[in-house]
Image (cartoon, helix red, strand yellow):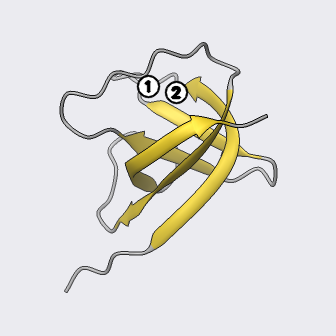
Amino acid sequence: MKHSFDVTATGTLSRAEAETQPLVLTTDTGATWELVLPPGWVVDVDPGARLTVRGDVIDEPSSTQVGPRLRVRSLSRAD
């Protein structure tokens, strides 16, 4: 049985140096999340931007190994 955990995280956006270059959020505590966007979403922010992301942890392994995967439900700039 798969579990879903609601997460809200604030941090800095970057692209992982993996083949698919997934979006990664690195929090102020050093945790990293691979961001999985809903179909049709395009994120138009520069790497290094600070964002707050809310989503659900995807309880499946990632092929990129950058950190746990977070299925994004909302995101906004963090000031």
53 displayed left or right of 10: left
- Establish if 29 lies above or below 12: below
- Snapshot quadrant of residue 77: top right
Q: Amino acid at mark 2?
A: Ala
| Numbered disc 1: secondary structure | loop
Residue at 39% in and 63% down: 56
- Snapshot quadrant of residue 8: bottom right
Q: Is residue 65 visible?
A: no
* Crowd around label 1: few <14 · some 14–19 · many ≥20 (10 Å): few
29 displayed left or right of 62: right
Q: Amino acid at mark 1?
A: Ala
Q: Position of residue 43 (x, y in %)?
A: 42, 22
Q: Is residue 18 visible?
A: yes
- Establish if 35 lies above or below 6: above
Quick one: which residue is furthest to the bottom in this view? 1
* Proximity of marks 2 and 1: CB atoms separated by less than 8 Å: yes
Q: Which mark is residue 31?
A: none
Q: Position of residue 57 (x, y in %)?
A: 41, 64
Spatial CA span between label 2 and label 1: 5 Å
Name the one closer to the observer, 58 or 46: 46
27 displayed left or right of 70: right
Name the one closer to the observer, 53 or 47: 53
Q: Position of residue 69 (x, y in %)?
A: 41, 53
| Numbered disc 2: secondary structure | loop
- Establish if 58 lies above or below 19: below
- Establish if 11 lies above or below 4: above
Q: Quadrant of the N terminus?
A: bottom left
| Residue labelled with disc 2 | 16
| Residue labelled with disc 1 | 18
